[in-house]
Amino acid sequence: MSKHVIESLIFRPGTELPATDMDGRDVLVYQLCDGWLLGRVSVIEDDDGEPPYVTIDDYRHNILRPAMWAYLPDYGENLQSLAPEE
């Protein structure tokens, strides 16, 4: 029997950067000129004591400048519960 999974996305303004502990996390991005895109959070830390550089990149590693964005659910930890029951 199939299970229904209900998730909600919380959209943030493009001026708000992702948290530094979300490195590698997938996000849904809305750009005014391109529409909806998938992106990934990228955090580059410097050894000089500078604050980390946080961006949202596309699959070609181009930096996206979103009007708004949202973290996508991390299904990796929930795949066990979505597996069919025997």
Image (cartoon, rainbow, N blue to C red):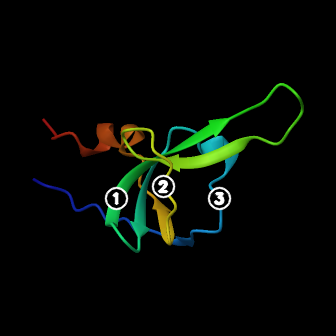
Neighbour class for label 2 at 10 Å: few (<14), some, many (≥20)? some
Image position of 14 (left or right of 36): right
Local secondary structure at mark 3: loop
Q: Of tags 1 and 2, which is closer to the observer?
A: 2
Q: Of tags 3 and 2, which is closer to the observer?
A: 2
**Disc 2: which residue:** 64
Local secondary structure at mark 2: loop
Q: Are marks 1 and 2 in contact (CB under 8 Å)?
A: yes
Q: Residue 84, image x and y in percent? A: 15, 41
Q: Residue 82, image x and y in percent? A: 25, 45
What residue do we see at 65% from left, 58% from top? 17
What residue do we see at 36% from left, 45% from top? 75
**Disc 3: which residue:** 17
* Placement of the C terminus among the 4 image quadrants: top left
Mark 3 and mark 1: Cα distance apart in space: 17 Å
Instruction: Answer with mark 1 or mark 2, whichever residue precedes in sequence.
Output: 1
Residue pushed farthest top?
47
**Disc 1: which residue:** 37
Neighbour class for label 3 at 10 Å: few (<14), some, many (≥20)? some
Q: Residue 20, image x and y in percent? A: 68, 45
Local secondary structure at mark 1: strand
Mark 1 and mark 2: Cα distance apart in space: 9 Å
Instruction: Answer with mark 3 or mark 2, whichever residue precedes in sequence.
Output: 3
**The image quarter in which residue 29 lies:** bottom left
Name the residue type under label 1. Answer: Leu
Q: Nearer the viewer, residue 23 or 83?
A: 23
71 to 80, vertically: above or below: below
Q: Nearer the viewer, residue 21 or 28?
A: 28
Image position of 77 (left or right of 34): right
Q: How many marks?
A: 3
Mark 3 and mark 2: Cα distance apart in space: 12 Å
17 to 32, vertically: above or below: above
